[in-house]
Amino acid sequence: MRTVFGVVRQIQSLVGRLPIVGGSEAASGAQVRPLAAGRRPLLGDGLGEQRRGGARLDQVDGTTCGSAVLIALTAWADPAETLRLDGEQRGGSAAGSGGAGTAVTSGARAGVAAGFGARYNARQREVHRESTRFWPQALGTTPWGMVRWLRRNAPAAGPYRVRFVDDVSAADLEPALDAARAALTAGRPVPMLVGQPLAPRHYVMALGVLDDGQWRVYEPTSGHVKALDLRLVRERRLARVLGFDRLHALFLPI
């Protein structure tokens, strides 16, 4: 059974309106430039639970998975986002011991001020309001709300586009995965929308490719970075890792 966005993708194909198809899509991802060094991301380089300032980096409620992903992507691209969450609006003396490019696996080492958890939760709610301005907040964030928020509020991340995926069609799925892999190899995170066949439900974010080809994926419900075997995407059995079985869309950097 095709997903809702898989049907959209199939219709686009039938009427000849696919924006990018086949090998050209993968090639476009390979041309994506990595962003500058000296970043101060929220998420660490390894697998497992992500914590900062004594708080787990999970979504604040059942509707803010998209907001958690947007914050993580913004922080990856712009150290000012992390500085604000850490309570260092202007990068004061607490940040001086580590520097802007220092790993952030330890809140104390990064100079995180008290109250990080409250600031992080408040920031999620703020981003949720901003990204659902024309949509009921109780229904979460739409794909268009995600890319619009990034364009307006996170220019350092660069523009992204929504790439619907027909996950029952290898001819459509494989070029989409190739394009995402190219972006990840270039150092660019790739948000993903997963869900049930008739309902896209949950945002996660691919962060990189492991040596064995699995993807490192941030899952905000648990606040963990997990290893995703792409075989599960192809077999439509994502729930064991990401909570829902079906891939609806990828968000690719332009």
Image: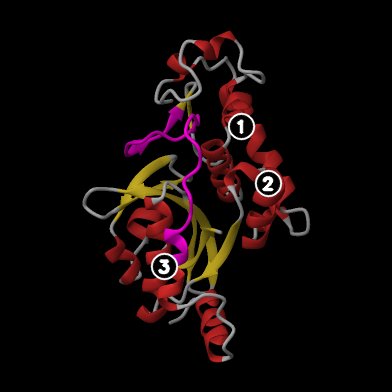
Q: Which quarter of the rendered picture does the C terminus lie within?
A: bottom right
Q: Under tag 3, what secondary structure?
A: helix
Q: Under tag 2, what secondary structure?
A: helix
Q: Residue furthest right?
A: 134
Judge the density around disc 2: few (<14), some (14-19), many (≥20) Cα neighbours within 10 Å. many
Relative placement, left or right, of 211 versus 192 is left
Colour setting:
secondary structure
Q: Which residues are magenta?
A: 27-51
Instruction: Find out whether the residues at labels 3 and 2 contact each other: C-beta distance under 8 Å.
Output: no
Going from the N terminus, do you reach mark 3 or mark 1 first? 3
Three-letter residue code for mark 2 = His
Q: Quadrant of residue 90?
A: top right
Disc number at residue 157? none
Q: Which quarter of the rendered picture does the N terminus lie within?
A: bottom left
CA gap between label 3 and label 1 equals 30 Å
> Residue drawn at (21%, 52%), measured in percent from left and top?
212
50 drawn magenta: yes
CA gap between label 2 and label 1 equals 16 Å
Q: Is residue 231 above or below residue 81?
A: below
Relative placement, left or right, of 48 versus 67 is left
Q: Which residue is mark 1?
A: 81
Q: Quadrant of residue 106?
A: top left
Q: Is residue 213 above or below residue 231?
A: above
**Rendering coords of residue 35 (x, y %):** 50, 42
Disc number at residue 128? 2
Q: Is residue 32 above or below residue 45?
A: below
Three-letter residue code for mark 1 = Glu
Residue in front for this viewpoint, 146 or 223: 146
Front: mark 3 or 1? 3
Disc number at residue 26? 3
